[in-house]
Amino acid sequence: MPVRSLLLFLALSLLTSHANALTIYKYVDKNGVVTYTDKATPGAQVFVFRDRMVEHLEKLVKLETRKHAAGETLLVRNDLYAPVEVELSLNDVSNASGAPDKPIRWVLPARSSIRLATLAPLDASKAMRYTPRLRYALGDPRLQPSLYRYPLPWRGGPFRLTQGANGKYSHFTPKGRYALDIAMPVGTPIVAARSGMVVKVENQQSGRGNNPSGNFVRILHDDGTMGVYLHLTRGSVSVREGQHVNVGDALALSGNTGNSTGPHLHFVVQRNVGLALESIPYDFAQPVDTLPNFAVVGSN
């Protein structure tokens, strides 16, 4: 059987700096040996790895403009089941009063909207002009993480850790620096490692697809942190956005979707640090390569 003669993270450790996207090459020699390298090789399969946490929220966090006789009102609407920190700034303002001099920053609760500015023309015979810019990040940065040791979020095993925190292969961006990759067969039951609200899921991606995360489940915890379970099997996610889950509840089946070189679970804990979502350190309650205490196949 073919063996991996060169582990991917060893090849990438030769790089002197990291970017948000990496290109690597996979080829199989005449003896069936699989090699990963950062050097282009004729006939090699190309992998481009980007930040694994890509979530399109533009349809869920929106700036709305409501025109009325006196002018225009700018509102921000949050359709997510999680709070969102927003920042609205207006640039290139012309013929408008009421425009803020500095960006307006606010934490918008889940499933809510807020008026951030009302503009009126200085000269009613002329149009107002301005360029709005809305920035946002999931979560409430005012909350502080509480001490919590995460149960292993799967049933079965034992499995092995294939990439830890600050890994040179992909765990080097702010969103994934403290993530862990655990190799496991496709179809392994994945369960909630902490109770909370399901705020975002992806369930329809097959293969590499167009999202580096593949299929995933994001859960908001009471202390404002979020646990994210990535690379899940298409169609296997069994929870919905807005659903509350408890520790040990079934979430999905592990898979090999998105930017994944092999079947595994990518688990990361994140929080909003101020208009930026970043991973934070966490500990499992037991070694990864042991059988989960509560998540044994057939247990409740």
Image (cartoon, rainbow, N blue to C red):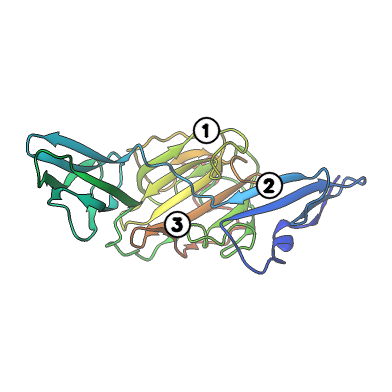
- Residue type of the residue flagged with mark 1: Ser
Image point (53%, 60%), residue name? 173
- Residue type of the residue flagged with mark 2: Phe
Q: Mark 2 vs mark 1: give the one in front.
A: 2
Toward the viewer: 7 or 124?
A: 124
**Rounded to the nearest whole Å, what is the CA distance between mark 3 and mark 2?**
25 Å
Q: Which of the two labelled residues, at mark 3 and mark 1, occupies the earlier sequence position?
A: 1
Give the side of residue 185 with respect to residue 117, left or right: right
Rate crowding at label 1 as few (under 14), some (14 to 19) or many (20 or more) other CA atoms within 10 Å. some
The disc at residue 47 is: 2
Furthest-bottom residue in view?
Answer: 16
**Rounded to the nearest whole Å, what is the CA distance between mark 2 and mark 1?**
25 Å
Q: Mark 3 vs mark 2: give the one in front.
A: 2
- Residue at mark 1: 236
The disc at residue 269 is: 3
- Residue type of the residue flagged with mark 3: Val
Tell me the SS state at disc 2: strand
Rate crowding at label 3 as few (under 14), some (14 to 19) or many (20 or more) other CA atoms within 10 Å. many
